[in-house]
Image: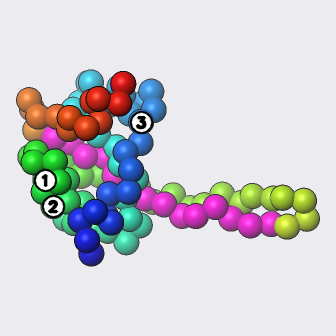
Amino acid sequence: MNLFNILKKPIITSKTAKLKYKNNEYVFMVDKYANKFQIKHAVESLFKVKVVNVNTANFIGKQKRIGKNVGYKNDWKKAIIKLSNGQEIHVINKLK
């Protein structure tokens, strides 16, 4: 699996901002087939930081209805990445 395909996009909300400032944790939407070791390797290689811990959560797509047609949103996976003290991901910090 390619490193650029593992990390899809950062999730930037008020809750993830609190995680960033209190616990030095960053949240990413990742490929749903990536495991914790692949996610850790991708973050360390792309951003040149030291990852302490990776937590993941799988989300099942919700049902959506348009008229009489019923469909589902895509399933996705979230990764919460804790960095060691004093390190940060500069790309995300500039999105304020």
The foreground one among 52 and 69 is: 69
Q: Secondary structure at mark 3?
A: loop
**Where the N terminus falls, by quadrant?**
bottom left
Residue 44 tag number: 1
What residue lies at 23% left-to-right and 30% top-to-bottom?
A: 23
Position of 17 with respect to 87 (left or right) is right
How far is mark 2 from mark 1, CA to CA? 5 Å
Q: Sort mark 1 into few (<14), some (14-19) or many (20+) by Cα contacts within 10 Å.
A: some
- Whether the magenta-drawn stretch holds residue 73 is answered as yes
Cβ atoms under marks 3 and 2 closer than 8 Å: no
Q: Which residues are magenta?
A: 70-83
User: Which residue lies under the disc numbered 2?
Assistant: 41
- Please tell me whether residue 39 is drawn above or below residue 79 in the rendered image: below
Q: Amino acid at mark 3?
A: Ile
Q: Residue 78: in sight, yes or no? A: no
Cβ atoms under marks 2 and 1 closer than 8 Å: yes
Looking at marks 1 and 3 on the same chain, the residue that comes earlier in the sequence is marked by 3
Quadrant location of residue 84? top left
Residue 63 appears at what percent x and percent y?
71, 60
